[in-house]
Amino acid sequence: MKSYSFYQGFIAVNALPLAVIFMVFFVFAGALAFHRAEWWSYFDSVYYTVVTVTTIGYWDFTPITTLWKVFTMIYAMTGVPVFIVLAWFMLENRFNRRIKRYLFNVHREIQNTEHKVEEIEEEIHHQGEKPTKKPFRKRRFR
């Protein structure tokens, strides 16, 4: 009987919490920087960083100084890939769980089928067995 091993998605399982923590830190650190530099409320700063990182860009908030415009460009160019990687980890984790569940169900069905085949083979084997005592036969003489 074969044993099946399941792919668990090493990166998705182990790096997902780390990626989420890094993304939250990234958003709140950027929000703190914009809050201090542009004098926006902290909520507006968080809102701006999320809108920037998710590439929505409503243009309702924009940095005023050239330095913070450059900072926003660098922040967006690093934040967008971080957000994409986080989304990738989340999708990969969900996909791997579904595949693992599907493979587990297939494995269980294979085991059930193998068990049924073994039972049927035993039943056929027992039906085809000859009795231990040989039946009495009349001998013919020529």
Image (tube, helix red, strand yellow):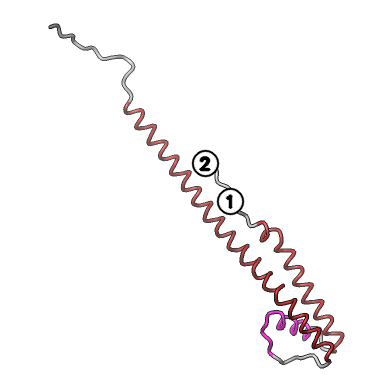
Q: Which mark is residue 134?
A: none
Above or below: residue 37 compared with residue 123: below
Q: CA distance from mark 1 to mark 2?
A: 13 Å
Give the class, few, some or many, for how many residues have Cα within 10 Å of label 1's Cα (few <14, many ≥20).
few
Residue type, numbered disc 2? Lys
Q: Is residue 45 magenta?
A: yes
Label 2 sits on residue = 2
Res 115 quadrant in image: top left
Left of 134 or right of it: where is 95? Answer: right
Q: Could you say which quadrant of the image residue 137 lies in? A: top left
Q: Main secondary structure of the magenta part?
A: helix
Q: Is residue 99 left or right of residue 70?
A: left
Where is residue 7? Give x, y as percent: 60, 53
- Callout 2: helix, strand or loop? loop
Q: Which residue is mark 1?
A: 6
- Residue found farthest to the left: 142
Residue 134 location (% of width, % of height): 28, 14
Q: Is residue 124 above or below residue 20?
A: above
Where does residue 12 sit, x and y in percent of width and height? Answer: 66, 61
Residue drawn at 56 percent across, 60 percent down: 98
Q: Quadrant of the C terminus?
A: top left
Q: Please tell me which residue is depicted at 44% across the width and 41% down the height of the picture.
A: 114
Tell me where the magenta segment starts and ends, as one range: 43-58
Counting from the top left corner in percent of width and height, residue 36 is at: 87, 85
Label 1 SS:
loop
The residue at 32%/27% (across/down) is 128
